[in-house]
Image: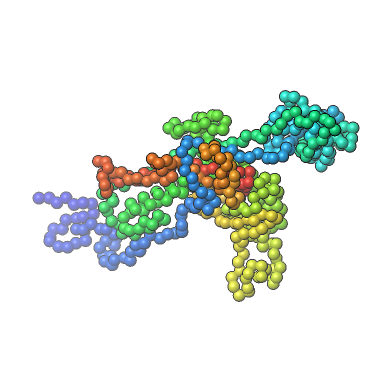
């Protein structure tokens, strides 16, 4: 009889106990069983990254509502007053060509200026005149404006072919003159977003679910124990939960044919596309962007912040706003605010900061008021964590923060047929009495209650949702 030995195991010629007769479980080839001491096993897995999940941002600033359709369509109010930009002016002939409204939307012949309106005309040089609209050319974008104090606009000091701002501030009619012959209708302004279906999946063999390890696992979802698949499944679930929020911030609508296998839906342009409009893209498309508050110096940052306030004044002027920013922007804002209170012993404002010389100095600010606006500042983990957007902090046009109005807005809901009060941000997920697709998980396979003949445990994750960004003109993206 011959004995075949596994690698590393030698048969002894005599009946005796030798290290070479046994499998060596130690990592070192030289120590073998000579290392007879049991090492101290630190069973608990070290959490070296703290809380790894980033979800929670939308929960702070918005809400969630069920939706029964593929699309969500809502309408928003336009501006009440009439103001336009004009160019190609023939100032000697008092003729101006309307191009855009003040938000940059092309209007041309569809402008709302009528005969009898009194207007304020201003050019970039600062020269401003007041005049009376005597002619509106039918089917064209041109109007004729007669200045009150000069024979023509040329004599009033306006420049040919310059760019002008025209504001309607009233009207004037002679005694006995007929009134208006045309009416202004409000422009219907609607927006659309569509849901996306998100999925994930985890699989472990049936045998591994019955295998115990020596590491005690723990995770963000509360899982713990000595079964490693609990750790892996919990990480998959936590990652998918974060993806639900990250997708609502980063996604954009495609205006080209969708990739193979992805459902298509018509966008605002009527083209077939995939995707959905996330927060950042909604602000880029319909809101405002700033490169201000860079930390160059406190005085510059304050001036840049005041420029942000000027933009808010031109829009909804929502008094309470929340600022979610990355670390460098947060410190720049702290320095900006601290420079406004640099009095006291050694330049430290003990009274203002509610500090004393014997306690740790608080150099951070969580809120402040500037002009008529209140701002509440918070760190945005998504922008700081190097595993997420923090990895892009040193790139050009990286997102440094976002300013979001607090409270609710009033909009006309196409589905309900009435005006509704809703948060400026809210998530719509697909749901009905039959199925709720906000966040679905289900288990298949042979583990537990067997559902298939496949000897695995399969965990499925699914959500169908989109983000509604109402009143994006009140948002500011810092990049």
Q: Position of residue 238 (x, y in %)?
A: 42, 51
The relative height of residue 219 versus residue 259 in the rendered view (above or below) is: below
Coloring scheme of the render? rainbow
The total of numbered circles placed on residues is 0
Viewed as shown, does residue 387 lie left or right of 104? left
Q: Residue at x 76, y 38 (%)?
A: 167
Say which of 75 and 376 sits in front.
Answer: 75
Q: Residue at x 62, y 34 (%)?
A: 188
The relative height of residue 423 versus residue 174 in the rendered view (above or below) is: below
Q: Position of residue 290 (x, y in %)?
A: 65, 47
Say which of 26 and 120 sits in front.
Answer: 120
Question: Does any portion of residue 193 appear in the rendered image?
Answer: no
Q: Position of residue 444 (x, y in %)?
A: 31, 44
Q: Residue at x 28, y 51 (%)?
A: 209
Toward which corner of the image does residue 105 lie, by quadrant?
top right
Q: Position of residue 364 (x, y in %)?
A: 61, 62
Viewed as shown, does residue 389 lie left or right of 236? right
């Amino acid at each position: 009889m011959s004995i075949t030995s596994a690698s590393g195991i030698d048969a002894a010629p005599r009946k005796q106990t030798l290290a070479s007769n046994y499998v060596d479980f130690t990592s070192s080839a030289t120590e073998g069983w000579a290392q007879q001491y049991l090492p101290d096993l630190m069973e608990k897995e070290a959490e070296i990254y703290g809380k790894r999940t980033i979800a929670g941002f939308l929960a702070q600033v918005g809400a969630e509502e069920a939706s029964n359709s593929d699309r969500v369509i809502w309408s928003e109010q336009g501006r009440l007053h009439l103001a336009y930009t004009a160019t190609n002016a023939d100032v000697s002939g008092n003729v101006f060509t309307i191009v855009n409204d003040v938000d940059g939307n092309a209007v041309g012949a569809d402008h709302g200026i009528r005969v009898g309106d009194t207007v304020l005309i201003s050019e970039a040089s600062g020269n401003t005149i007041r005049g009376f609209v005597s002619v509106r050319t039918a089917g064209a974008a041109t109007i004729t404006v007669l200045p009150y104090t000069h024979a023509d606009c040329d004599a009033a000091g306006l420049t040919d072919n310059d760019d002008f701002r025209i504001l309607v501030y009233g009207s004037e009619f002679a005694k006995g003159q007929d009134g208006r012959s045309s009416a202004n209708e409000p422009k219907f302004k609607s927006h659309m977003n569509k849901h996306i279906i998100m999925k994930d999946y985890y699989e472990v063999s049936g045998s591994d679910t019955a295998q115990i390890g020596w590491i005690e696992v723990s995770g963000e979802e509360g899982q713990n124990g000595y079964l490693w698949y609990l750790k892996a499944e919990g990480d998959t679930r936590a990652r998918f939960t974060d993806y639900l929020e990250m997708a609502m911030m980063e996604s954009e609508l495609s205006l080209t044919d969708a990739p193979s296998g992805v459902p298509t839906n018509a966008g605002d342009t009527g083209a077939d596309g995939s995707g959905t409009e996330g927060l950042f893209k909604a602000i880029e498309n319909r809101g405002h962007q700033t490169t201000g508050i860079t930390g160059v110096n406190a005085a510059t940052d304050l001036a840049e912040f005041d420029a942000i306030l000027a933009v808010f004044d031109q829009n909804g002027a929502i008094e309470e706003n929340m600022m979610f920013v990355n670390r460098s922007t947060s410190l720049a804002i702290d320095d900006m605010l601290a420079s406004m209170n640099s009095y006291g012993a050694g330049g430290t404002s003990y009274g203002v900061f509610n500090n004393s010389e014997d306690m740790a100095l608080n150099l951070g600010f969580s809120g402040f008021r500037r002009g008529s606006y209140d701002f509440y500042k918070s760190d945005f983990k998504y922008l700081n964590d190097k595993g997420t957007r923090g990895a892009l902090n040193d790139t050009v046009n990286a997102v440094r923060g976002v300013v979001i109005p607090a409270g609710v807005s009033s909009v006309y809901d196409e589905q309900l047929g009435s005006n509704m009060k809703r948060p400026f941000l809210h998530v719509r997920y697909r749901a009905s009495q039959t199925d709720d697709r906000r966040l679905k998980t289900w288990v298949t396979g042979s583990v537990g209650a067997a559902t298939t003949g496949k000897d695995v445990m399969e965990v499925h994750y699914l959500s169908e949702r989109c983000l509604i960004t109402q009143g994006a003109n009140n948002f500011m993206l810092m990049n």
